[in-house]
Each structure stands twice: as C-alpha cells, then as structure tokens.
Amino acid sequence: MQTIETRVDSEAARYYLEHYLPGNRMDTELDERIDRVYQNANGALPDRGELKRLSDEFSVDFAALYLVDQITHMSDNRRFRIAFDQAYNFTRKALPRDRVKLSRAADYEVLVVPIYLYKRLIGSGADLAAPRAALEKVGLNCHFVETQDDGAVEANADLVADAIRARMQSGRRLIVISASKSGPEVGLALTRLQPAETRHVAAWINVAGVLQGSPLADEHRFRELEFLVGEVDVAGEDSLTTLRGRRRFDSFRIPEHVLVVNYLGIPVTGSISFGAEEVFIPCESTDPTMGFRSWLI
C-alpha cells in the first residue's frame, strides 16, 4: 500500500538508465561526466571507495546501476549468463513444470548452510527451507548444517568443515549453498580444509554473502533484534564487523577445482520496501570476483 513516484533516487540515475545506457545521449554536460567515470575506470570494477565517491557525486542508485553495468560487461559473467539462460530455457521447454527431474541428480548432493538467527526468525526464510524443498523436488539430496544460529563465523566454519568432510565417502559430488552470514563461514571452511578433504566439492553457490562483514555489525545494529528473538551472542555480531571480515576475506584460499557462483541482488531504492529498509543488511564485497574463479548472475 505504498505509493511509488520513482524507482530511482535522482535525475542522474534516471537519465543514466533511460538514456545514457541505451545510447540516447541528450544531456551533453551529464554525458561528459558519465563518460569520464568510464574512462577513469578503464573497464575495472569499482571498489568501495569509488562507489562511495560516485554516490556522493551522483547518487546511491547511480552507483548501484553503474556497478551492475560494469559486472555485466565482464567476459566471464557474460559467458556464464548465456549458458545459464540457455540451460534454463531448454529445461522449461523440455520438461513439464510438475515433473522436472535432473537427469544427473544422483551424481550430486547439496549441503545447505543457513542464515543468521535461522532458528528464531521464524518465517523469514533464514533456514532456506524453500530452496531446499525446490532442490529436493528435482531429485537432489539435501543435507542441512546445524550451525549456531547466533554464533561467530569462525566457530561455525568448523561445523561447516566437519559437514563437508563427512560427505567425502558418499560417492557424489557436493554442491555447497550459503547465504548472507553463512557465506564467510563456508569460505573459511573451504580455506581451512586440506586439499584431499575438498576433492568431492564441485561448487559453492554464495547467495549475497557478507564476505567482508557488515557496517551494521560495526554499529551494533544486530543487537536491536533482541526484542524479537531474545538475547543474542555478541560473538556472532563481532565476527561480522568489517575489520574482521576484511581480514578473514584476505585469508580465503578456495580450491581451484571448486566452481564459485556469487549470486547477488543489487537493488535500487524504489524496489526496497519500508519493511526491508528497517532490516536490510548490506552485502559488502569490494571484489565480486573474490580473487578466484567465480561468476555473478
């Protein structure tokens, strides 16, 4: 029941999306300013400092849209997106919606690592129950990792590592799925494991993982959830500060054979509801390629 007058937060963002990107240049001064942004970037993705500068010079939505455009022009991402769309469209046409089964599902199994406070934020989707049900419907066997729902990243990483190690003798290739806080937990687990302990891991799907921590943890905003869920372990919040998150991220060494897919949503302000604004936890990742082989959709 909200009235939306605009989906972006500035005239610069509107012009950039509606005119500049399609090549319909109508504002010489603004065109030149945007041209300089691309020229200075020389094809590189913006880091956190550049995104902040663009947000100040233009607007937050402009910076978000610019990041999306730069990501979509990366060759690895373009190839992956083409392959993904082809496979998706083929499956939709070839199989009835209610009888879809993956032909090679028996060769794989899935390890799902839940989100922060998944035991207490009932109905939030933090337990990833819906994705698990969808995966099982197409024939994939899913295993759920019982982490500490408010525990520190480092402690939960040990639980994830144990779960990955436990699937070594299953005879199936393992796909690990994480989201939000469980992203750094999986990244750290894969880093800590020995090469022989990850040979069965085929892929890691990282959905909006807070790989470098969250500014909300710096501001102790997670503790504001206590009126809903009761007392939370401060160690979990402390482990998500940007200082610790960035140090941990720099230590990540993901095995070369593991396909890493980073699935990130980059919204503009007009697509974020009032409710989401109150609980939205920004995902900070200065290098979407994470320093190793990965793709974004």
Image (cartoon, helix red, strand yellow):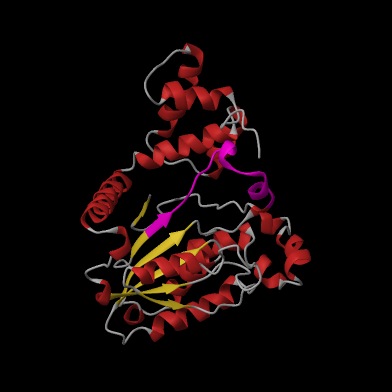
Q: Is residue 209 left or right of residue 216?
A: left
Q: Is residue 156 magenta?
A: no
What residue do we see at 33% from left, 57% from top? Answer: 293
Instruction: In this rendered view, identify the residue nearer to me: 162 or 112.
Output: 112
Residue 178 position (above or below residue 20): below
How many marks the image carries: the answer is: 0
Q: Position of residue 57 (x, y in %)?
A: 59, 28
Instruction: In this rendered view, identify the residue nearer to me: 200 or 22.
Output: 22
What residue do we see at 40% from left, 52% from top? Answer: 289
Q: Which residues are magenta?
A: 261-278
Q: Is residue 264 magenta?
A: yes
Residue 217 sits in which quadrant?
Answer: bottom right
Residue 214 position (above or below residue 170): above
Residue at the far right in the pictured view: 227
Residue 60 sits in which quadrant?
Answer: top right
Q: Position of residue 203 (x, y in %)?
A: 34, 67
Q: Position of residue 172 (x, y in %)?
A: 28, 79
What residue do we see at 46% from left, 17% from top? Answer: 32
Residue 151 position (above or below residue 60): below
Q: Quadrant of the N terminus?
A: top right
Residue 167 sits in which quadrant?
Answer: bottom left
Is residue 222 visible in this depiction of the protein? Answer: yes
Q: Is residue 105 left or right of residue 181?
A: left
Is residue 251 visible in this depiction of the protein? Answer: no
